[in-house]
Amino acid sequence: MTPFTFFHVLLSLIGIASGLLVLFGMLASNRLPALTATFLATTVATSVTGFFFPFDHLLPSHIVGIMSLAALAIALAALYALHLRGAWRWIYVATAVFPLYLNVFVLVAQAFQKVPALHALAPTQAEPPFAIAQGIVLLVFIALGIVATRKFHPH
């Protein structure tokens, strides 16, 4: 692993860990300002650094990065410029949870590529165990996002 790859992966893991804590804070209607800033900054940095790996054409990882950055731009505006007023509260929740989901989606994909036991179950990532794992991740994030949207009312 190159130092740059290590840095990118480290940013991603910090973003996922802090993002999960922020998501659980949302469920308790707690903003967690410092942790939220960490989550948003490291998740933006993860997506940006993904574009610095060598490539000669647009890859699925770039599409994920573009979607993540677009959602994060809205989340940042909703939180810091629009102060979660009115509909911006639920828009913030949705646009913060979505990039977190995307990072976990990528984490699961990487786990199926790099962890021998998982790779053996789905070597091409077209096999049912991979689809089932990703389906569970998606359903969990949809459920948590819906609950967070309903419960997150910070003062």
Image (cartoon, rainbow, N blue to C red):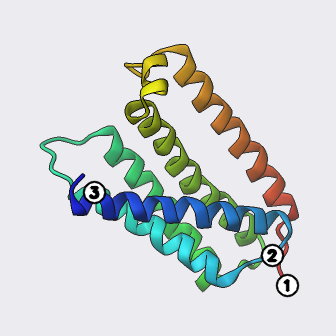
**Label 2: few (<14), some (14–19) or many (≥20) C-alpha neighbours in 10 Å:** some
Residue under the image location 69 percent in, 65 percent down: 21
Residue highlighted by disc 3: 5
Residue 146 at x, y percent in the picture: 79, 50
**Label 3: few (<14), some (14–19) or many (≥20) C-alpha neighbours in 10 Å:** some
Q: Nearer the viewer, residue 45 or 79?
A: 45
Query: Mark 1 or mark 3, which has the lower sequence index?
Result: 3
Q: Nearer the viewer, residue 42 or 86?
A: 42
Residue 17 at x, y percent in the picture: 59, 62
Please tell me whether mark 3 or mark 2 is closer to you in this view. 3
Residue 103 at x, y percent in the picture: 50, 51
Query: Mark 2 or mark 1, which has the lower sequence index?
Result: 2
Is 31 left, or right, of 120 in this rendering?
right
Residue under the image location 70 percent in, 71 percent down: 88
Residue type at mark 2?
Asn
Residue type at mark 3?
Thr
In this rendering, the answer to whether 121 lies above or below 141 is above
Residue highlighted by disc 1: 155
Query: Mark 3 or mark 2, which has the lower sequence index?
Result: 3
Which label was assigned to residue 30? 2
CA gap between label 1 and label 3 equals: 39 Å
Is 57 left, or right, of 129 in this rendering?
left
Furthest toward the top, the residue is: 127
